[in-house]
Image (tube, grey):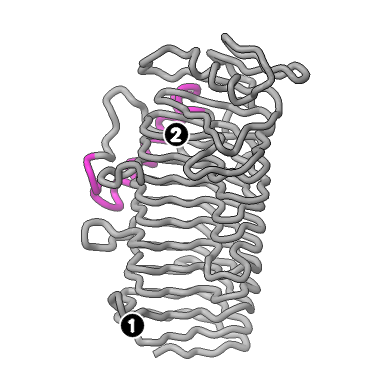
Amino acid sequence: MGTRAATPIWKRRPAMLLTGVVVLATAAALTAPATAAQEKPQGVPPGPVAGDVGTLACGDGSYDAEVVQNGGTWTAPGYSGDSLLEAMRAAVGSLTPNRTSMESVVVRGSGSVPAEQSLDLPSYTSLEVCGTLEVTGSMSAGQAPIRIRNAENVAVPYLENMTGAPYFGIFVQNAHNVSLGQITMELSGGLGIRIDNHGDRSQRTTNVSIDSATISGAGSHAVETYGVDGFTAGTITATSVGESGLLLNDTINADIGTVNATDAGTGTGYAAFRMANRNGRINDGYPANIHVGEVIARGGGRGVFCVSESGGAVIDRVDLADTGNNAILIENCYNVTIAASSGTVSGGGEIRLAARDEFANNRDITLSNLTVINSAITENPCGENITISNIIWQNSQDNTC
């Protein structure tokens, strides 16, 4: 992962656009589109590809509106005063109404924003924050310093930092074609990035990407999705968060590079990487449509956790050590492959295949290419079509069927 964000698609060279077309075509080959909502409006280019290295640093582009700090005063088109939030709202409000092409806002400076209010980004808006948003006051449900609801073609190429305890740091709901670039949050509570469709659950949020999210101190998850079709991420780094590093709920067609979590969900059943609530289920099946390059976990709760009729997932590599709960727990999941390429599990809780009575038992699970150190693999009850192969056992127990 480079140190710069993915350049928004409207600033990229043609070669970058071609790369996006190739990646999307590859993803489409995994599964047929689940819904018509996956199709993009005519004239809209492919969404940014997670992990592309941008050509511009924060604030180096050309912008349609600027929010500038001068001492204790914020200025923006039509605004001069002491409120960073009102200055950002004025800048966004100064853009062309009902636009059908991208326009951009840059924030130059650091300041406080209230936890009980939001900056809403409408369609065809790009926001770069070249500074720190310090979230102050008491959080309020559904509020976020950066909120994208019922909108399409929105980008946040840079958020240099966010501190404090927001309800959500960034909130994406019932939106389409949203690109988040280089995102950093050093929080003291709240949830980092939440992406869902809970404003209208009859339609999924579609095509959301994160290049790099580095989040610490969240009281809940670093990144969570729910009801999303088409999610890509380069690297998600979570440190000392209260629950999961990355949690996917009822999300399909996802491709994640790396989840790297330290002390995620310590003392809980959450995990560095968790799939829940029929994640990966398309219609009534579980074709492979969730891909993760690598999950790294140090300490925390669990390393990898699949639960509640989730599946259709392939994790290429795992590197899990000293988790406080199960290093891996597969519970009522279907068509899941862990360590397709390689992996190491060292210490911590055992690797466990389990089932609750209210759901069908595990089916089509593969654990392979693992080195298991000072641990165990336990299967109870016995699942259907479970493959445990190419395991190197080092002071560890095989308790499978």
The image quarter in which residue 314 lies: bottom left
The answer to whether residue 309 is above or below residue 28 is below
**Main SS class of the magenta portion in the image:** helix
Q: Is mark 1 on a helix, strand or loop?
A: loop
Q: Is mark 2 on a helix, strand or loop?
A: strand
Give how far across and how far down residue 148 sits, in percent. Answer: 44, 34
- The residue shown at (39%, 41%) is 23
Q: Quadrant location of the N terminus?
A: top right
Q: Nearer the viewer, residue 196 or 336?
A: 196
The image quarter in which residue 160 lies: top right
The image quarter in which residue 271 lies: bottom right
Image-based side of 241 in relation to 306, left or right: right
Badge 1 amino acid? Gly
Tell me the CA gap for discs 2 and 1. Answer: 42 Å
Q: Which of 43 and 106 is in front in this view?
A: 106
Q: Mark 2 points at which residue?
A: 148
Image-based side of 388 in relation to 201, left or right: right
